Image (cartoon, grey):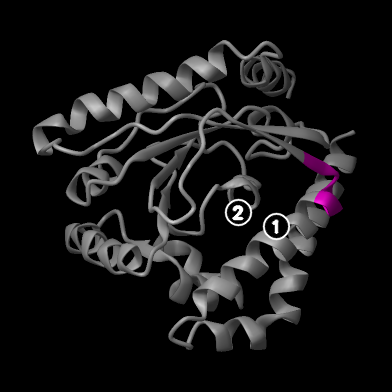
Amino acid sequence: MRFLIVLWRTWFYLLSAVPVVVLFPLLALLLVLPNGYRPFFWIARNIWSRFVMLGTGFWVIKKSKTALDPNKSYLLVANHSSYIDIMLMFATAPNPFVFVGKKELVKIPFFGYLYKRAAIMVDRSNSKSRHGVYGRARKVLERGYSVCIFPEKEYLDETILLNPFKQGAFRIAIEHQLPICPMVFLDCKRKFPWYTTHGYPGLLRVEVHPTLPTVGLTEDDIPGLQQKTYDLIHSELQNDPQQMAIDAIEVWKKVTKAG
Protein backbone atom coordinates (compact mmCIF):
# COMPACT_ATOMS: atom_id res chain seq x y z
CA MET A 1 0.00 0.00 0.00
CA ARG A 2 2.80 2.46 0.86
CA PHE A 3 4.34 1.83 -2.57
CA LEU A 4 1.05 2.71 -4.28
CA ILE A 5 0.74 5.93 -2.26
CA VAL A 6 4.28 6.97 -3.18
CA LEU A 7 3.54 6.17 -6.82
CA TRP A 8 0.34 8.21 -6.67
CA ARG A 9 2.14 11.17 -5.11
CA THR A 10 4.86 10.97 -7.75
CA TRP A 11 2.11 11.10 -10.38
CA PHE A 12 0.77 14.25 -8.70
CA TYR A 13 4.15 15.98 -8.96
CA LEU A 14 4.43 14.94 -12.61
CA LEU A 15 0.97 16.32 -13.38
CA SER A 16 1.85 19.55 -11.58
CA ALA A 17 5.02 19.99 -13.62
CA VAL A 18 3.89 19.08 -17.14
CA PRO A 19 1.52 22.03 -17.80
CA VAL A 20 4.04 24.45 -16.29
CA VAL A 21 6.81 23.24 -18.61
CA VAL A 22 4.60 22.99 -21.71
CA LEU A 23 2.96 26.40 -21.17
CA PHE A 24 6.07 28.09 -19.79
CA PRO A 25 6.78 30.38 -22.79
CA LEU A 26 3.18 31.64 -22.81
CA LEU A 27 3.01 32.06 -19.03
CA ALA A 28 6.35 33.86 -18.88
CA LEU A 29 5.23 36.21 -21.65
CA LEU A 30 1.95 37.01 -19.89
CA LEU A 31 3.78 37.97 -16.71
CA VAL A 32 5.81 40.66 -18.48
CA LEU A 33 2.73 42.24 -20.07
CA PRO A 34 1.09 45.14 -18.17
CA ASN A 35 -2.27 43.35 -17.84
CA GLY A 36 -1.02 39.80 -18.27
CA TYR A 37 -1.79 38.52 -14.78
CA ARG A 38 -5.52 38.16 -15.43
CA PRO A 39 -5.11 35.63 -18.30
CA PHE A 40 -2.29 34.01 -16.31
CA PHE A 41 -4.70 33.52 -13.42
CA TRP A 42 -7.37 32.16 -15.78
CA ILE A 43 -4.94 29.49 -16.99
CA ALA A 44 -3.92 28.61 -13.41
CA ARG A 45 -7.56 28.32 -12.36
CA ASN A 46 -9.15 26.61 -15.34
CA ILE A 47 -6.33 24.55 -16.82
CA TRP A 48 -3.49 23.90 -14.41
CA SER A 49 -5.36 23.37 -11.12
CA ARG A 50 -8.19 21.34 -12.61
CA PHE A 51 -5.80 19.23 -14.71
CA VAL A 52 -3.78 18.35 -11.61
CA MET A 53 -6.76 17.63 -9.34
CA LEU A 54 -8.73 15.57 -11.85
CA GLY A 55 -5.61 13.71 -12.92
CA THR A 56 -4.84 12.87 -9.29
CA GLY A 57 -8.39 11.63 -8.76
CA PHE A 58 -10.00 14.58 -6.96
CA TRP A 59 -13.18 16.49 -7.67
CA VAL A 60 -14.45 19.51 -5.79
CA ILE A 61 -17.69 20.68 -4.20
CA LYS A 62 -17.76 24.31 -3.09
CA LYS A 63 -20.36 25.57 -0.65
CA SER A 64 -20.62 29.36 -0.58
CA LYS A 65 -22.30 30.74 2.53
CA THR A 66 -22.14 34.29 1.19
CA ALA A 67 -22.35 36.20 -2.08
CA LEU A 68 -19.15 38.11 -2.78
CA ASP A 69 -18.78 41.11 -5.06
CA PRO A 70 -16.70 40.02 -8.11
CA ASN A 71 -15.44 43.59 -8.47
CA LYS A 72 -14.22 43.89 -4.89
CA SER A 73 -10.91 42.85 -3.33
CA TYR A 74 -10.73 40.54 -0.31
CA LEU A 75 -8.16 38.92 1.91
CA LEU A 76 -8.64 35.18 1.35
CA VAL A 77 -7.48 32.92 4.19
CA ALA A 78 -7.75 29.15 4.63
CA ASN A 79 -6.28 26.27 6.60
CA HIS A 80 -3.15 24.80 5.01
CA SER A 81 -2.70 21.04 5.38
CA SER A 82 -1.73 19.76 1.93
CA TYR A 83 0.26 20.46 -1.23
CA ILE A 84 -2.99 20.35 -3.13
CA ASP A 85 -4.31 23.39 -1.22
CA ILE A 86 -2.73 25.66 -3.84
CA MET A 87 -4.65 24.04 -6.70
CA LEU A 88 -7.80 23.94 -4.60
CA MET A 89 -7.55 27.66 -3.83
CA PHE A 90 -7.09 28.52 -7.49
CA ALA A 91 -10.11 26.39 -8.44
CA THR A 92 -12.51 27.63 -5.77
CA ALA A 93 -11.55 31.18 -4.77
CA PRO A 94 -14.43 33.56 -5.48
CA ASN A 95 -12.21 36.30 -6.97
CA PRO A 96 -8.89 36.47 -8.88
CA PHE A 97 -6.11 36.76 -6.32
CA VAL A 98 -2.36 36.88 -5.78
CA PHE A 99 -0.67 34.53 -3.31
CA VAL A 100 1.60 35.70 -0.52
CA GLY A 101 4.06 32.83 -0.21
CA LYS A 102 7.49 31.84 1.04
CA LYS A 103 10.59 32.77 -0.91
CA GLU A 104 12.01 29.23 -0.91
CA LEU A 105 9.66 28.14 -3.71
CA VAL A 106 11.66 30.27 -6.17
CA LYS A 107 14.23 27.45 -6.29
CA ILE A 108 11.83 25.09 -8.13
CA PRO A 109 12.78 24.97 -11.87
CA PHE A 110 10.31 26.72 -14.24
CA PHE A 111 7.69 27.09 -11.49
CA GLY A 112 10.04 29.27 -9.45
CA TYR A 113 10.56 31.71 -12.32
CA LEU A 114 6.80 32.18 -12.71
CA TYR A 115 6.18 32.22 -8.97
CA LYS A 116 8.72 35.00 -8.47
CA ARG A 117 6.81 37.21 -10.89
CA ALA A 118 3.25 36.19 -10.04
CA ALA A 119 3.26 36.00 -6.24
CA ILE A 120 4.13 38.33 -3.37
CA MET A 121 7.19 36.64 -1.94
CA VAL A 122 8.28 36.91 1.66
CA ASP A 123 11.40 35.76 3.49
CA ARG A 124 9.97 35.11 6.94
CA SER A 125 13.44 35.26 8.52
CA ASN A 126 13.99 38.81 7.23
CA SER A 127 12.08 41.67 8.85
CA LYS A 128 12.69 43.96 5.85
CA SER A 129 11.15 41.36 3.53
CA ARG A 130 8.15 40.90 5.81
CA HIS A 131 7.57 44.64 5.95
CA GLY A 132 7.89 44.90 2.15
CA VAL A 133 4.87 42.65 1.72
CA TYR A 134 2.55 45.51 2.66
CA GLY A 135 3.77 47.73 -0.16
CA ARG A 136 3.59 44.93 -2.71
CA ALA A 137 0.09 44.04 -1.52
CA ARG A 138 -0.96 47.64 -2.13
CA LYS A 139 0.09 47.39 -5.77
CA VAL A 140 -1.87 44.15 -6.19
CA LEU A 141 -5.00 45.69 -4.69
CA GLU A 142 -4.68 48.75 -6.92
CA ARG A 143 -4.99 46.40 -9.89
CA GLY A 144 -8.25 45.06 -8.51
CA TYR A 145 -7.07 41.64 -7.29
CA SER A 146 -7.60 39.95 -3.95
CA VAL A 147 -4.74 38.71 -1.75
CA CYS A 148 -4.51 35.11 -0.51
CA ILE A 149 -2.55 33.99 2.56
CA PHE A 150 -2.40 30.69 4.44
CA PRO A 151 -1.87 32.23 7.91
CA GLU A 152 -0.84 29.16 9.92
CA LYS A 153 2.64 29.14 11.49
CA GLU A 154 4.03 25.59 11.61
CA TYR A 155 1.53 23.76 9.43
CA LEU A 156 3.55 20.56 8.82
CA ASP A 157 2.62 18.96 12.17
CA GLU A 158 0.00 16.32 11.30
CA THR A 159 -1.09 15.96 14.95
CA ILE A 160 -2.51 19.51 15.14
CA LEU A 161 -5.95 20.27 13.77
CA LEU A 162 -5.19 23.93 13.07
CA ASN A 163 -1.95 25.67 13.96
CA PRO A 164 -1.91 29.19 15.45
CA PHE A 165 -2.12 32.06 12.96
CA LYS A 166 0.53 34.66 12.22
CA GLN A 167 -0.51 38.31 12.42
CA GLY A 168 0.73 39.39 9.00
CA ALA A 169 -2.46 38.55 7.09
CA PHE A 170 -4.63 40.49 9.51
CA ARG A 171 -2.26 43.45 9.53
CA ILE A 172 -2.61 43.64 5.73
CA ALA A 173 -6.40 43.38 5.99
CA ILE A 174 -6.67 46.22 8.50
CA GLU A 175 -4.09 48.43 6.79
CA HIS A 176 -6.02 48.24 3.51
CA GLN A 177 -9.48 47.91 5.10
CA LEU A 178 -9.95 44.58 3.29
CA PRO A 179 -12.81 42.31 4.30
CA ILE A 180 -11.51 38.87 5.28
CA CYS A 181 -13.01 35.90 3.46
CA PRO A 182 -12.44 32.69 5.50
CA MET A 183 -12.33 29.48 3.47
CA VAL A 184 -12.26 25.98 4.97
CA PHE A 185 -10.67 22.99 3.23
CA LEU A 186 -12.34 20.07 4.99
CA ASP A 187 -10.79 16.99 3.37
CA CYS A 188 -7.19 17.74 2.36
CA LYS A 189 -5.60 16.77 5.68
CA ARG A 190 -7.07 13.27 5.44
CA LYS A 191 -6.88 12.60 1.70
CA PHE A 192 -3.61 14.29 0.69
CA PRO A 193 -1.45 14.96 3.78
CA TRP A 194 2.06 16.41 3.72
CA TYR A 195 3.67 13.00 4.05
CA THR A 196 3.37 9.79 2.01
CA THR A 197 2.04 7.75 4.94
CA HIS A 198 -1.60 7.70 3.89
CA GLY A 199 -4.23 9.38 1.73
CA TYR A 200 -6.60 8.52 -1.08
CA PRO A 201 -8.41 10.26 -3.99
CA GLY A 202 -12.01 11.45 -3.86
CA LEU A 203 -14.16 14.46 -3.03
CA LEU A 204 -12.65 17.69 -1.70
CA ARG A 205 -15.12 19.99 0.07
CA VAL A 206 -14.59 23.72 0.35
CA GLU A 207 -16.65 26.18 2.39
CA VAL A 208 -16.60 29.91 1.68
CA HIS A 209 -17.81 31.80 4.75
CA PRO A 210 -19.29 35.29 5.16
CA THR A 211 -16.65 37.99 5.26
CA LEU A 212 -15.31 39.58 8.42
CA PRO A 213 -15.30 43.39 8.06
CA THR A 214 -12.24 45.49 8.88
CA VAL A 215 -13.55 49.00 8.20
CA GLY A 216 -12.72 51.23 11.13
CA LEU A 217 -10.40 48.70 12.77
CA THR A 218 -6.90 49.64 13.85
CA GLU A 219 -3.68 47.85 14.69
CA ASP A 220 -5.00 47.30 18.22
CA ASP A 221 -7.76 45.10 16.76
CA ILE A 222 -5.36 42.65 15.05
CA PRO A 223 -5.27 40.03 17.86
CA GLY A 224 -9.06 39.93 18.15
CA LEU A 225 -9.56 39.65 14.39
CA GLN A 226 -6.87 36.99 14.20
CA GLN A 227 -8.53 34.93 16.94
CA LYS A 228 -12.02 35.34 15.47
CA THR A 229 -10.85 34.02 12.11
CA TYR A 230 -8.95 31.16 13.74
CA ASP A 231 -11.96 30.15 15.86
CA LEU A 232 -14.25 30.10 12.82
CA ILE A 233 -12.02 27.81 10.75
CA HIS A 234 -11.12 25.60 13.74
CA SER A 235 -14.79 25.18 14.63
CA GLU A 236 -15.70 24.11 11.09
CA LEU A 237 -12.93 21.51 11.02
CA GLN A 238 -13.84 20.22 14.48
CA ASN A 239 -17.58 20.06 13.80
CA ASP A 240 -17.40 18.65 10.29
CA PRO A 241 -20.08 15.90 10.14
CA GLN A 242 -17.62 13.64 8.31
CA GLN A 243 -14.82 14.41 10.82
CA MET A 244 -12.20 14.24 8.08
CA ALA A 245 -9.52 16.40 9.69
CA ILE A 246 -10.07 14.78 13.10
CA ASP A 247 -9.79 11.36 11.51
CA ALA A 248 -6.59 12.41 9.73
CA ILE A 249 -4.89 13.01 13.09
CA GLU A 250 -5.86 9.56 14.38
CA VAL A 251 -4.72 7.88 11.15
CA TRP A 252 -1.40 9.69 11.34
CA LYS A 253 -0.83 8.57 14.91
CA LYS A 254 -1.63 4.93 14.06
CA VAL A 255 0.55 4.87 10.95
CA THR A 256 3.56 6.50 12.60
CA LYS A 257 3.23 4.31 15.71
CA ALA A 258 3.07 1.19 13.57
CA GLY A 259 6.12 2.39 11.64
Image x and y of residue 248, in percent: 67, 21
The answer to which quarter of the image holds residue 122 is bottom left
- Name the residue that disc number 2 marks: 90
Quarter of the figure that contains the N terminus: top right
Pick the residue in front: 67 or 122: 67
Q: Determine the residue positioned at 36% across, 27% down.
A: 229
Q: Is 72 left, or right, of 220 in this rendering?
A: right
Q: Are marks 1 and 2 in contact (CB under 8 Å)?
A: yes
Q: CA distance from mark 1 to mark 2?
A: 7 Å
**In magenta segment, residue 237:** no
Q: Determine the residue positioned at 36% across, 69% down.
A: 143
Pick the residue in front: 213 or 163: 213
Is residue 42 shown above or below 13? below
Numbered tag placed on residue 24 in the rendering: none
Q: The magenta stretch spans which residues?
A: 54-59
First in sequence: mark 1 vs mark 2: 1
Quarter of the figure that contains the C terminus: top right
Query: Which amino acid lies under the numbered mark 1 shown in the image of this protein?
Result: Ser
Query: Which amino acid lies under the numbered mark 2 shown in the image of this protein?
Result: Phe
Is residue 47 shown above or below 224? below
Numbered tag placed on residue 49 in the rendering: 1
**Is residue 6 at least partly visible in the picture?**
yes
Few, some or many C-alpha atoms within 10 Å of disc 2 (few <14, some 14-19, many ≥20)? many
